[in-house]
Amino acid sequence: MSLRNRVLTLIAAVLVLGGVALAATLHAAGRAAEKDRTRPGDPRVARGEVVLDAPGRSVFRNMAWGPHRDEIASVPAADPSGPRTSSGVRCLRFHAAGGTGICLQAVHGRLHDGYRAVVLDARLRELHHYDLAGVPTRARVSPSGRSVAWTVFVSGDSYAGTNFSTRTSVLDLRTGTLDRNLEDYRFYLDGRLHEAADTNVWGVTFADDTHFYATVATGGRTHLVRGDRTDRTLRSVHDNVECPSLSPDGTRVAYKKRVEGAPSDAPWRLYVLDLRTLRETPAAERRNIDDQAVWRDDRTLVYALPGDYGSDLWTVPADGSGSPRLTMPAALAPAFTG
């Protein structure tokens, strides 16, 4: 091939590659723009004031397409399909109780992105923020609103396998004390002190400002533990419990349980554990649950499942009766106020 032909071939290749790159860029921009537009049939969302101490409200991360996606929004708890009021505050994970909110956010920088935990007052104003060591995955506030907790993936991005590492922190808002890593607590497994390099802790659910439940994983098994912030201990209660959620009356824990015969990438079903008798009751939901459920009241569980917008909220009775019901499309991380 002559020099002239080689130059022409090179120019043609550059033009082709440039066209491919331009088309990919335009396609990505079009998809991004599509996410910013509402679609017919989408939930109605409008900017307004969202407060965390108003009675009878459901507060959640809005997942509907449009300019308010990922913002904390609110609807009357009795009318979950009604128009949504959106706050302008964006969170990846969120929870609220006692007039306090915890918002785990993405922070976009010039060179790299990061994450932070932001403590919010009842009107979603920032009180404190803390840099996070990984990707947000769980968040909880104590019933009084005086303690908050969060979990991040330090490595890995799923609980389904074993190749992940978490870090769970608990913050006392009265004293400002931050327990940065609950793995520093003493862990008692079946009454005996257990020390292992593979220990992971995640999924705090508060009983009060001092006591909580959580998941501890070690040796390929998971355990429900009761935590005490005063003596900095974790004590095992029951096996095969992940992402616990304590009922409002403090007598039961809803959780995801690994069941035999389920696919390795979808291993969990929703169960409820009676803390007095340790009797397990499977919920009527038979699909895979990878969420930390929330109690709407002492009878009803709310949890997320994948949907057209990324996530929908479903409900099911906690006693094993009934059947699952879609309660709110395009929503994630609910909390109930008042």
Image (tube, rainbow, N blue to C red):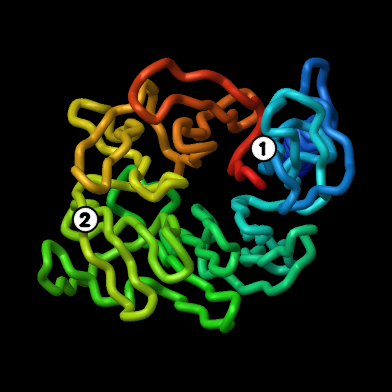
Q: At numbered mark 2, what does the secondary structure look like: helix, strand or loop?
A: strand
Residue closest to the eye, 299 or 199? 299
* Quarter assignment of residue 271: top left
Quadrant where the N terminus lies?
top right
Residue 182 picture location, percent across and down: 37, 71
Question: What amino acid does circle 2 point to?
Answer: Val
Q: Earlier in the sequence, mark 1 or mark 2?
A: 1
| Residue receiving disc 1 | 1
Disc 2: which residue = 237
Dot 1: within a 10 Å radius of its alpha carbon, few (fewer than 14), some, or many (20 or more) residues? few
Question: Looking at the picture, how far across and down is residue 102, in whole percent?
Answer: 63, 60
At 27% from the left and 68% from the top, the residue drawn is 234
Q: What's the residue at 35%, 32% (across, down)?
A: 270
Whether 27 is drawn above or below 119: the answer is above
Camera-side residue of 251 and 292 = 251
In the shown orientation, is residue 295 left or right of residue 185? right
Looking at the picture, does residue 164 appear above or below residue 174? above
Check disc 1 and give the amino acid type.
Met
